[in-house]
Image (tube, rainbow, N blue to C red):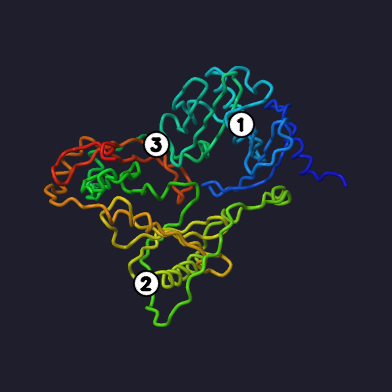
Amino acid sequence: MGCTMMDIRIKELLDATQQKYGLDNYYLHSHEIYRDVTILGETNYFLSMEWFPAHMKEWKGDYNPEGTAVITIDLQSRNYKSVIFVGGISYANGTPFQNIDFNGVIRWIEDEARIVYGKQFHLEKEQIGEYHFIEKIGSIPVTPGGRIELRFDAEGRLVFYSVYGQFPSSSLVHKENYTLTLQTIEPQARKQLQLIEYPVYETKQLLPIYGIEEIYITNDGTTTIPFEFISGTRARLNIDQVIHWEQQNTELEPFERTEIRLLEVVTIEQAIASEPHPDSFPITDAEQAECIAAVEAGLSQLFPDESGEWMLKTFQRERGHIQATLRMKAPSNRIFQRKILLFIDVQNYKVINYMDNKPMLDMFDEFKSEEGISVSHDEAYDKLKGWFELTPVYVYDPGQKKYVLCGKLDCNYAVKATSGDVVELSSLE
């Protein structure tokens, strides 16, 4: 039996990797193929390899020994996504770099990741033997943003390299001149200033403060994008619907969780065919209707007495299931809000598992609330507005499937509602 075409291709990549990273003192311990979905809905296939140091032939541990080279390469682009030597220890011969000064590192990343310094990525910080870069379009940051990190040992050998994020081409970026000012977005800023109870762990107190909830405002000033909605790497479908159900009179069967598999086994054949990841497909109207019914049924079983109290915020595909995110219809004034994730089986549209952050929030019930609010919303706004920050950022908009220019409204300060003092948020922790 001869090798299949893909087997030969993988053998070529294994050999090329061993040569490129000087792994003469290593042997291939294991390799596997996996896939993921980008925020653009594209499926990428990766080859992940574990190279063990040659002197670790009889390794029996459940974890990788120090010096193991864990290397991942994109099967389509042949770009390396990560090169990690466990424990920061390398037994490699030499380094893939001509030199490891700043310019040498930049040239290597540009060649390796096929992105341009100053246009798509910029230096964030530099230390001895360590470089951190962040994704920017021109001089403007991007969210969800990409990151690149490299580390070298004392001998100049690469011990850590990682590329994370999309680094979009210019065709996906809607470029325009940034025009937002704090004056033009005052109505949104007033709305974002909220009275919340801020937990001070040391004294077990809930401190009433006025603070800004971080948000993105489109460059024309007409639309806001919640910070939570664009975090992560999966596109989300916005629902914003209060969930009601008929009260159940009969005793329901206790809910039984089905385990959700975290790792997916992908075959060579799937990779050859570039089979789309199940999570890459948009959620259809029919699926949306089925999932809303599943959420109603699931909530009625899990929280039978809470009809009308939950708001279904979003759906997104996750590990072959559809994940529903829910929040309380009437939010509390605490900084951490109640949140539930429901996992829906797409074969039978039933909730098979859930996550609830209530146990984490329950610890705040022991905290003492501080009484005597003496500062109004308007007074707090006037005290705090000089500390507001509005910075340009490109935000991925799933509706347009483009990165659009926004202003990120944030503030590192707050007003104590009992005294009117302006305080730095970090000083309250």
Residue under numbered circle 3: 176
Point out the tag, 1 or 2, that comes first from the N-terminus.
1
Query: Does residue 63 appear to the left or right of 273 in the view shown?
Result: left
Q: Nearer the viewer, mark 2 or mark 3?
A: 2
Q: CA distance from mark 2 to mark 3?
A: 43 Å
Point out the tag, 3 or 1, that comes first from the N-terminus.
1
Looking at the image, do the residues carrying marks 2 and 3 touch, with CB atoms under 8 Å apart? Answer: no
Q: Which residue is found at the position 34% from the left and 41% from the top?
A: 219
Classed neighbour count for the residue bearing mark 1: other residues with Cα under 10 Å, few (<14), some (14–19), many (≥20): many
The C terminus: image quadrant: top left
Q: Which residue is found at the position 57% from the left and 27% from the top?
A: 109
Q: CA distance from mark 3 to mark 1?
A: 42 Å
The amino acid type of the residue labelled 3 equals Glu
Total marks placed: 3
Q: Can you give x and y, in whole percent of width and height, for residue 70 in the image?
A: 63, 36
The amino acid type of the residue labelled 1 equals Phe
Query: Does residue 110 appear to the left or right of 364 in the view shown?
Result: right
Classed neighbour count for the residue bearing mark 3: other residues with Cα under 10 Å, few (<14), some (14–19), many (≥20): few
Residue under numbered circle 1: 85
Based on the displayed image, in which of its 4 quarters is residue 393 positioned?
top left
Q: CA distance from mark 1 to mark 2?
A: 52 Å
Residue under numbered circle 2: 244
Q: Can you give x and y, in whole percent of width and height, for residue 235 in the image?
A: 48, 51
Q: Secondary structure at mark 2?
A: loop
Q: Which mark is residue 106?
A: none
Q: Nearer the viewer, mark 3 or mark 1?
A: 1
